Image (cartoon, helix red, strand yellow):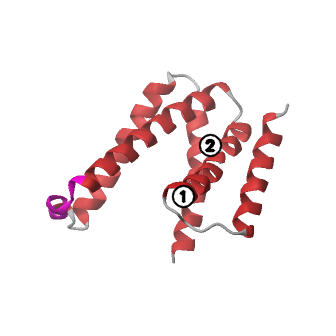
Amino acid sequence: MWKYYALLSALFAALTAIFAKIGVKDINSNLATAIRTTIILLLTWGMVIFSGRLNEIKAISNHTWCFLMLSGLATGLSWLFYFKALQTGDVSRVAPIDKLSVVITILLAFFLLKEPINTKVITGALLITAGSIIMLWK
């Protein structure tokens, strides 16, 4: 089932890039990010409340809070830079370069989480890197 969720994530990420490029055209990229984040905030809290999971917030450990906050900060910074890049660059070039995050994630997962790495993963990461480098050229 995770593969379907991952494919849906990719679809909505693609739509995000297209919609964001159009939406950020006439306003400050930070304001655009704030508006987008507010919509996400309302959507996700609505899902938590609707699914009856709000009471689980009391059971979250300090360790979990810490890393969720760090993840939120990293996400926020990623979005701010992404929207700025979209505002000043072509979406067809920004999005593939942004996907270098996949390669960085693989490296961080290997070094920090001790996740295994194999030839298939290395080959895929090299192909993503090569594609991103090609997209940098005019």
Give the vertical position of 34 relative to 7 (above or below). Answer: above
Q: Which residue bears the numbered disc 2?
A: 18
Total residue callouts = 2
Q: Position of residue 135 (x, y in %)?
A: 79, 40
For this view, does 75 lie left or right of residue 81?
Answer: left
- 138 and 110: which one is in front? 110
Q: CA distance from mark 1 to mark 2?
A: 29 Å
2 versus 8 height, above or below = below
Measuring from the top left, give residue 73's x and y in whole percent.
39, 39
Badge nearest the viewer, 1 or 2: 1
Q: Where on the picture, by quarter, is residue 70?
A: top left
Q: Secondary structure at mark 2?
A: helix
Query: In terms of sequence position, does the residue under pointer 1 or pointer 2 come before the other?
Result: 2
The label on residue 32 is none
Within the image, what quadrant is residue 36 found in? top left
Name which residue type carries label 1: Ala
Magenta-drawn stretch contains 48: no
Q: Main secondary structure of the magenta part?
A: helix
Q: Which residue is mark 1?
A: 109
Outermost residue on the bottom side: it is 1
Q: Magenta stretch: give its range.
A: 55-62
Q: Amino acid at mark 2?
A: Ile
Residue 87 or residue 19, whichever sits in front = 87
Task: Check residue 60 for magenta coloring.
Answer: yes
On screen, residue 19 versus residue 63, left or right, reads right
Residue 17 appears in view: yes
Q: Callout 2: 10 Å neighbours few (<14), some, many (20+)?
A: some
